Amino acid sequence: MKAHMGLHRVFNSRIVQNAASLYAVQFLAYLLPLISLPYLARTLEPLHFGLVAFAQSFANWLAVLGEYGFTYSATRSLARQRERKEAVAGIVASVLGAKLILVLGMVLLTLGAGAFVQSFRQYPELVFWALLIAIFIALRPTWYFQAIERAWLVALMEGLIRVGHLAAIFAFVRGPEDAWVALAAQALATGGVAGLELYLMYREVPFRLPNLPLSWVALRVGFSLFLSRASDSLYTSANGMILGLLTTPVQVAFFETGNRLARPGLSILWPLAQAIYPRINHLIRRDAQAAQRLSRLALWSTLGIGLVGGAFLAILAPYLIRLLFGEAYETSVRVLQVLSLLLPIVAFGYSLSMQYMFPRQMDREVMYSVLSAGLVNLALAALLAPRLGALGMAFAVVAAEAWAALFRFFVLKRKGVL
């Protein structure tokens, strides 16, 4: 009875509030692409739309380096120390110092991409704006607000980025020659929100200048999570970039048309897991049984959402593609139907990592799952994409996500956690 009342209080406090706010912004995240993507796809036409998608995929992949897994490692550390003001200030300083080091690496990688990637050599303005997008994403302190269970603020800021980006697209993108404008709008919207979030954080946290030793500590602590995120990006955010290197910008356009309808669908899975994650970290050393019950409830709830969402997306795929993008993107119908399988698969795998593995510091096991899945994705992409184009990339992505989910399941079974 006591445990039941404890869980009742949990779900009537910050978890429900945070989950509700996150679901609101994820609904917005799904709705807005249904407005902006058809406009961009038709206005830029497949070639330039594919170039923009390729640059955005590169930016997302680059941002993984800047984020370095701090969304998980820093959130976990702050959630456990949030009552100690000086400890919080030290963690914040070390994380931001680490991010400044990482920005230098991002710049160097971008210079290399600008020199060797054909699309970027032809359109250097795209790689410039892609770099700015990545830097601003990396500098956003979302990990701080998640740790103090104020995810509603992160949701609000994410909504501001999306609305600002959408408004700029309709105001300034008029034809294929404006492809760079779509990237510039995203960069400026993200940069403005990153600055506002940093200001709000430092209204509450004493400012400490980062120092190199603590920054290296933060990098070392988060290394296994970074490898997980970097490997994960090989079969999530970097797929457009991988496909662009293996095929043509037009195939990237066909893949990303389906992918950008499926990925926002995946976003319905995150809010519940993200809202509960800091509470499980808070409970796990105080009431392990309550943490286990909360983990189980989150797993089954998220999986149920994924099953329903995936079924709807598969059924509606032909109508969505034809209505929103027109006959020029007919190839994307089968791509979207294949990618609809991601919703239940990712729901299962993501919940296992967020609700069971990360709170129990099984970072290495998660890292192994995504490293191996990244290799599966690359191998299948190299095999299938040159032959099947966008559809081959879709098969590779689904297979990689399934591998990662099954890997985590069997690890947890072997350790007796499930």
Image (tube, rainbow, N blue to C red):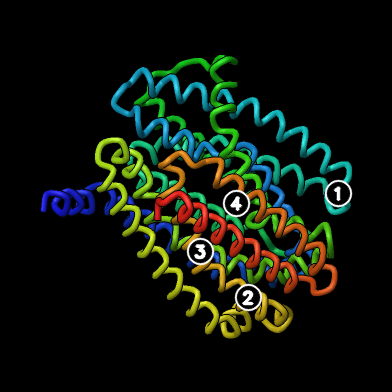
| Residue receiving disc 4 | 369
Question: How far across and down, in percent of the image, does residue 217 sit?
Answer: 55, 22
Q: Amino acid at mark 4?
A: Ser
**Type of amino acid at the residue the image marks with label 1:** Val
Estimate the x, y position of residue 292 in percent, counting from the top left. 31, 50
Q: Quadrant of residue 320?
A: bottom right
Give the mark, 1 or 3, whose residue is nearer the N terminus.
Answer: 1
80 or 135, which lies in front?
80
Q: Residue at x 37, y 56 (%)?
A: 272
Q: Is residue 67 visible?
A: no
Q: Amino acid at mark 3?
A: Leu
Decide: marks 3, 2 in contact (CB < 8 A)?
no
Query: Could you tell me which quadrant the N terminus lies in?
Result: bottom left
Q: In percent of the image, x 52 and y 62: which residue is there?
A: 346
Task: Look at 49% across and 42% down and name the residue there.
Answer: 362
Tag nearer the camera, 3 or 4: 4
Instruction: Give the tally of numbered discs.
Output: 4
Q: Which residue is mark 3?
A: 266
Image position of 107 (left or right of 276): right
Residue 338: give its label.
Answer: 2
* Residue 333 seen anywhere in this rendered image of the structure: yes
Q: CA distance from mark 4 to mark 2?
A: 22 Å
Residue that numbered label 1 is attached to? 117
The one of 212 and 208 positioned closer to us in this rendering:
212
Element type at mark 1? loop
Q: Secondary structure at mark 2?
A: helix
Does label 3 or label 2 sit earlier along the sequence? 3
* Residue 250, x across and y down, in percent: 79, 69
Quick one: SS at disc 4?
Answer: helix
**Mark 2 neighbour density, 10 Å: few (under 14) some (14–19) many (20 or more):** many
